Image (tube, coloured by chain):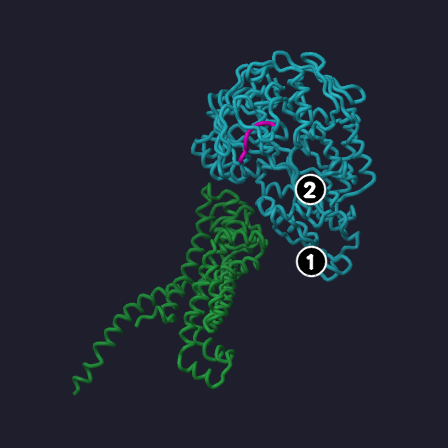
Amino acid sequence: MYERRITRAGAPAIGLAAVLALGACGSDDGTEDAGSAGAGGATTAESLRIGIMSEEGNLTPHTYATGFPGLNLTMLSYDSLMQIDENGQPQPWLAETVEGSADGLSYTIGLADGVTWHDGEALTADDVAFSVQYYQAGPPGRFATALGNITQAVAQDESTVVLTLAAPDPSFELRTLADVPILPEHVWSGVADPDVAPFDETTNVGSGPYRLVESDPGVSYSFEANPEYFRGEPKVDELVVVQFADEAGATAALRSGEIDTMMRSVSPEQIDVLRGTGTLDVVEAPEYTTTLLVFDTAVAPFDQAEFRRAVALAVDRQRLVDDVFLGAAVVGNAGWVHPDSPWYDESVETVHDPEEAAGLLDGLGLTDSDSDGIRELDGAPLSFELLVASNNALRMRLAELIGEQLGEVGIDIEVSSVEMQTLDDAVWPGYDVAQGRNYELAMWGWSAPSQADIGQMASLVATDPAIGNLNITGYSDPGTDALAAQLDTELDTTAREQVADELQQRIAEEVPFVSLLHPNGAYGYNPDVFGDWVSITGSGPMTKLSFIPGDGQP
Amino acid sequence: MTTTVSTDPEPGPAAVVRRGRRLRDHTTALGAIGGVIVLVLVTVAVLAPVLAPYDPAERAGTPFSSPSPDHLLGTNDVGQDLLSEMIYGTRVSLTVGIVAAAAAMLIGTVVGLIGGYFPRLGAVAMRGVDVVLILPFLPLLIVLAAYLGRSIVNTVIIIAILIWAPTARVIRAQVLSLANRDYIVAARSMGAGHGYVLWRHVLPKTMLLAIGEFVAATSGAILLESSLSFLGLGDPLQESWGSTLYWAQARGAFLTPAWKWWVLPPGLLIMFSALGFALLGYALEQRINPRLRRS
């Protein structure tokens, strides 16, 4: 049994308060349902209709279009050697045993018995070795990158594979074994150009709980349950995925009963509206997606840690969560790590204290000498431009609020909404931090994997672009660099935890960026059709885990 | 004797006058309605700080509240008072509409004057006008807005670039007929320069026409500004009616009961202001434009 099925993350009490203040709503079954099947609605279904809003192309590991929901849909038909469990930890899956050598350079993998492909052939060690070589030889992509560190993959017998690594990688299980889908050799060995693989009776062969039986990209997909699935027969017999032009259309379809759920988080203000319909419910779960306030740490006065700390102290994160997200978000932690992550260091405090911020600014000699409410730096008013992508309404509202809050401590902020591409060019030119940056302040965000893998924390703060490939604030500090390098290579779990804690404290103190909040995922669904969702901490309920029976969970 | 005097002039002019009056009454009434609407809007725009119960940027209440005595039109997604936003939005919408239309009138008048007065140059200029007229409007507007970036100045420029062509046409037609009038030919033959003739004799006779066109163009400009802002291509941080609609759409008001106080009011205001200027423009045009004037 597993304790946490649906984490209704109204959990932060403040969030609930804000929701209640709005008046509406059935907070019928409150915050928690512990393990009991059916708490969220029907536990099995003949057919579940799912709305998506993006063009997904052909759903193979080579041709899927988006990370979410494209890859999540693709992984319904495929499996990886390990599988993320509800807590975001990699667990044995196709691989029944995973043994790493002491030096971290070799992994011996024993495959589970009796796993077959959709066409009845057995899944063997040869398929695993083939998959590694096939991705490595193929076009660049997520899986080729994940496997880049493997120098050799040898099938020792029917069910044992040995992987040899070029360098030890503490995140290998999470980033590689639990991510890369294993391919059937008897299908893909005959495909020379996987990038243009068509949908047909062979390329839809996987090992996953569902088989893609109809594919009409841009319109709909249809998945059929695989009754022979090695983890047990899936809970829903048929999944029909329908594409909608936009969220408004899909939400309307959900309300009218044309679809039963949506693979897209609804916006905060819709949560109560959907619950208020009486027929629909919303599964709300914390997600690792981050929203940040970033600044160029090479520009004065952002080059001083005291100034950056003052900015962080002046921002009222709780207010942002309440006012813009109506409570449907988790307050960002000063040490970067999401409070629900197993790596989270409780000793790091996140404080809002405008008076202390003002004190710090005074201490830096940034005072308001002409009494216009704005402090001066060398005689010039302390005034900055805050860039925000114009396609993100919520972030624009956040930027406006932050501008007000910084204004209260005497820092003048002018919010500019720009095209997403313009923002990327200013903050992360060429998606390569080595190319520098050209902005003062900006609203930014990283996707869930940057939190799920603690090793990514190093990439946010390290000076060396090889490690710090996400260091868009140009932050550089020798003490932090040492911790980052250690985090990137430390194999021992306990020691790594220690390093992660120290790095979180360091980030809270040095403020290389301000982690503002993590929007919760909120997925509307019809509990009469299906409601037995299984949420993965940080990535939500829209994965294959929701369709795998209780005794087959990782 | 008396009969001839009284009956002779009677039938013709009287009939014309009667027919004319019937028409003019119609036009005048419409023009008056338009004028009142415009006057009210201008008053609201000028007196916005007095009329608005709150500062539109202030977070005056709970986000997403429905109408209440405190907030007659409820609040938006960050708790700003929607009524105040509507009132201040009048300023942005009218300013953009009027400035863009004025700029368009300026371009149109210059092109029209040159086009009508110098026939050869005019032939070339009018082909340019043709090109602008056949450009697919909204797509071009969107491309330009995306390319130039979003700010209120750019919005004005974009709208002006796109709506000057009809004005140029009307002005040119007027100038063409003026250029062959006897007094202009006389002035020219006495040695008056082109500049003098244009400034002294042609421009004054076309000015009224341009003003009529300007009022009509304002109506179009307000609609365009709203469309741009609604599509998120204006400056979404500038509170115009269009951007209120943009936020309503972005925060799902179209799917909730909030449309009644968040979507309907800006929609109606846009409609009324466009209608007001259109009616006023129509009435002015009927009186000014010699081609439309009944004879």
In the image, residue A102 sits, relative to residue A511, either above or below, namely above
Q: Tell me, yes or no, if residue B43 can be seen here.
A: no
> Which residue shows up at 46% across the image and 59% down it?
B133
Q: State the residue lying farthest toward the bottom.
A: B1
Task: Give the magenta-colored segment's residue range.
Answer: A55-61
Rendered shade, chain B: green
Percent coordinates x, y for residue A551 in the rendering: 59, 15
The answer to whether A503 appears left or right of B107 in the picture is right
Is the N terminus of chain A in the top left, top right, bottom left or bottom right quadrant? top right
Residue A109 is situated, as x and y percent measured from the top left of the image, at: 71, 17
Kind of residue sitting beneath label 1: Gly
Residue at which label 2 appears: A431
| Circle 2 crowding by C-alpha within 10 Å: few under 14, some 14–19, many from 20 | few
A31 or A509: nearer the eye? A509
Which residue lies under the disc numbered 1?
A373
Q: Report crowding for label 1: few under 14, some 14 to 19, many 20 or more residues within 10 A (C-alpha).
A: some
The chain shown in cyan is which? A
SS for callout 1 = loop
